[in-house]
Image: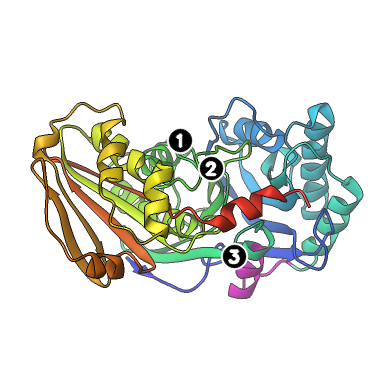
Amino acid sequence: MKEIQGGVTAAKGFKAASCEAGIKYKNRKDMLLIFSESPCTAAGVFTSNVVKAAPVMWDKEICGGIDAVHAIVGNSGIANACTGQEGKDICEKTAATVGELLGVPKNSVLVASTGVIGMQMNMDAVVSGIDKMAMNLSDSIEAGTGAAEAIMTTDTHSKEAAVEFEIGGVICKMGALAKGSGMIHPNMCTMLSFVTTDVAISHDLLQKALKNVVQDTFNMISVDGDMSTNDSLMVLANGEAGNKEIIEEGKDYDEFVAALFSICEKMARMLAGDGEGATALFTANVCGAKSKEDARVLAKSVICSSLTKAMIYGHDANFGRILCALGYSGVSFDPERIELSIESSAGKVDLFKKGEPLSFDEEYATKVLSEKEVIAKVNMNEGCCEATAWGCDLTYDYVKINADYRS
């Protein structure tokens, strides 16, 4: 497997387009369209927030079935959440418009929205945007990048990735885009991300692969502890690579899962590092835990703590905050066994070992904590299980961004 240039248009048979529809923003792209003429197997995982946006409810039904999917249409600016029956009607009309223009059924079109909750969509703007995009679909790298840019809200940069790999001797590709900067919190999956691949794989195995991969990628990130109403991660597989369809677990399935994990992990790291107002990616690696679930809970507790996030922003090696976050995680452990250090590209500082603080150079520790990625390494010394979580520092700008988000 190797990384290649591109995003959602990297896989064979996928085209994309984007445009300025004027749904809320002015003078910027705010709609995207992804299309495969070949029918796709689709899988998805969605927010566990009880308050679900209209597009989430539309997409869950489509991804839960076995009918072919051809397209994803999305917008930024307005979330189409908490919008009642009108919001549901907008989803159906949006899908129907795409279907009419591209010659596919409306129930083969997935719909995604992100932005302000509680505002109604302007259907005229949506239809106008779809008209523009349907005429400009392209399989170019630039078209994929444009789609990634169109779904941004408070993101500071677009997020996309692609990989090439082999299944049964056949070259296959997978690409993705994602958006997310605020309202990012674990438990599926707190953002929008679309993955495309030319692999042939059954619906059941595609869904299984996605559910397994998300546990240690998107479900291990947090920016602010707020779970969105619109979180969606969807995968389309059109089979155009020509591999023998994956219908059972084995070597081919494992190769596919590895590629999907690589893409999702990269996207997850990008989302965490681009948290609203963030200056650093904050990674917590917990090893030596008694179970995989314990390791996940401990790692997420560290990166979710407002105090540890503020510590990273202040470049202050106040390691007691990390120990405190481990302690209230809900996992039972012996504090006397813990070993704790911080690492970055500037070096490593050992902070705590087996119940006692270690002496360290404060100036050097500040240097280590001042890099673009800071890693807290925790060894519980109670088992052999490990997990990694990703977050970001907490800055003044986070409050500024969210204080006037609607404007």
x then y, percent, for residue 189: 50, 41
Closer to us: 384 or 235: 384
* In the image, residue 138 lies in the stretch drawn in magenta: yes
The span shown in magenta is: 137-147
Residue closest to the eye, 79 or 348:
348
Question: Counting residues from the N terminus, which is met first, the one under dot 2 or under dot 3?
Answer: 3
Disc 2 residue crowd, few under 14, some 14–19, many 20+, Cα 10 Å? many
Q: CA distance from mark 2 to mark 3?
A: 17 Å
The percent position of residue 117, horizontal first and vertical second, equals 73, 39
Whether residue 289 is visible:
yes
Quadrant for the N terminus, please: bottom left
**Label 2, label 1: how far apart the Cα atoms are:** 8 Å
Q: Quadrant of residue 140?
A: bottom right
Give the residue pinned by disc 2: 190
Q: CA distance from mark 1 to mark 3?
A: 24 Å
Please state if 227 lies on the left or on the right of 172 as rendered: right
Residue at label 1? Answer: 187
Q: Residue at x 55, y 51 (%)?
A: 193
Secondary structure at badge 2 equals loop
Are the residues tagged 2 and 1 within 8 Å (C-beta)? yes
Quick check: is 47 in the magenta stretch? no
Q: Secondary structure at mark 1?
A: loop
Quarter of the image holding residue 281? Answer: bottom left
Find disc 3 in the rendering and name its residue: 156
- In terms of depth relative to the viewer, which is nearer, 80 or 181? 181
